[in-house]
Amino acid sequence: MARASENPSEMIGKKAPAFNLPDQEGTKHKLSDYAGKHVILFFYPKDDTPGCTKESCAFTANLSQFEKLNTVVISISILDSASKKKFADKHGLQHILLADEDSKVAEKYGVWKEKSMYGRKFMGISRETFIIDSTGKIVMHWPKAQGNEKHPAEVLAWLKENG
């Protein structure tokens, strides 16, 4: 469970927590691999669900625009690399999908939270987006990112104005 010091809103201006996670092909990615670039890091609850699919497809649709802004798009959820590959292949996703199977990275970013559905409480990833600048600091956070095609456009607009 996230500690109070890991409140995502309090992370703006601070160094982004490091990670080293496998992608949909099993290749490991570290945050430090992207030094000198902006990183969009979006956390989503589960592969191949309606909201997560819309959001992921929209990030892929805008990928060339993000790349023009020296920005890499990375998504993270708790399902394994095989699930990520199936999700990416099914929907033609071209951004990096990382598997945080033990939820350690989600905990570091403060997005591993208690959730409730149909009266049942459980732990899961909250849909949240971060922008990490080229020096490795968190410069923007959307605590209630929408699982739809509008959110990536909102992130792109913010980057164009502030990046």
Image: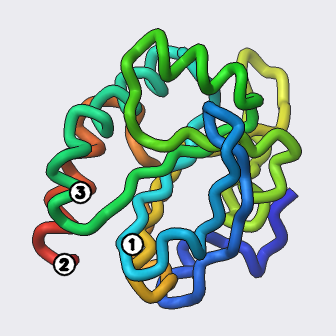
Q: Amino acid at mark 2?
A: Asn
Q: Amino acid at mark 3?
A: Glu
Q: Residue at x 79, y 21 (%)?
A: 119
* Mark nearer the viewer, 3 or 1: 3
Real-space Cα separation, disc 3 to disc 1, in angstroms: 18 Å
Q: Which mark is residue 85?
A: none
- How packed mark 1 is, by other alpha carbons closer than 10 Å (few <14, some 14-19, many 20 or more), is many
Disc nearer the start of the sequence (3/1): 3
Dots 2 and 3: beta carbons under 8 Å? no
Dots 1 and 2: beta carbons under 8 Å? yes
Image mark count: 3
Closer to the camera, 47 or 11? 47
- How packed mark 3 is, by other alpha carbons closer than 10 Å (few <14, some 14-19, many 20 or more), is few
Q: Is residue 121 above or below residue 119?
A: below
Q: Position of residue 75 (x, y in %)?
A: 52, 45
Q: Amino acid at mark 1?
A: Met
Left or right: residue 95 versus residue 118 is left
Q: What residue is pinned by disc 1? A: 140
Left or right: residue 145 versus residue 83 is left
Q: What residue is pinned by disc 3? A: 67
Q: Which mark is residue 162?
A: 2
Disc nearer the start of the sequence (1/2): 1
Q: Residue at x 62, y 32 (%)?
A: 24
Q: Is residue 36 above or below residue 128?
A: below
For the N terminus, which image quadrant? bottom right
Q: Is residue 156 above or below residue 120?
A: below
Left or right: residue 37 versus residue 81 is left
Farthest top residue in view? 90
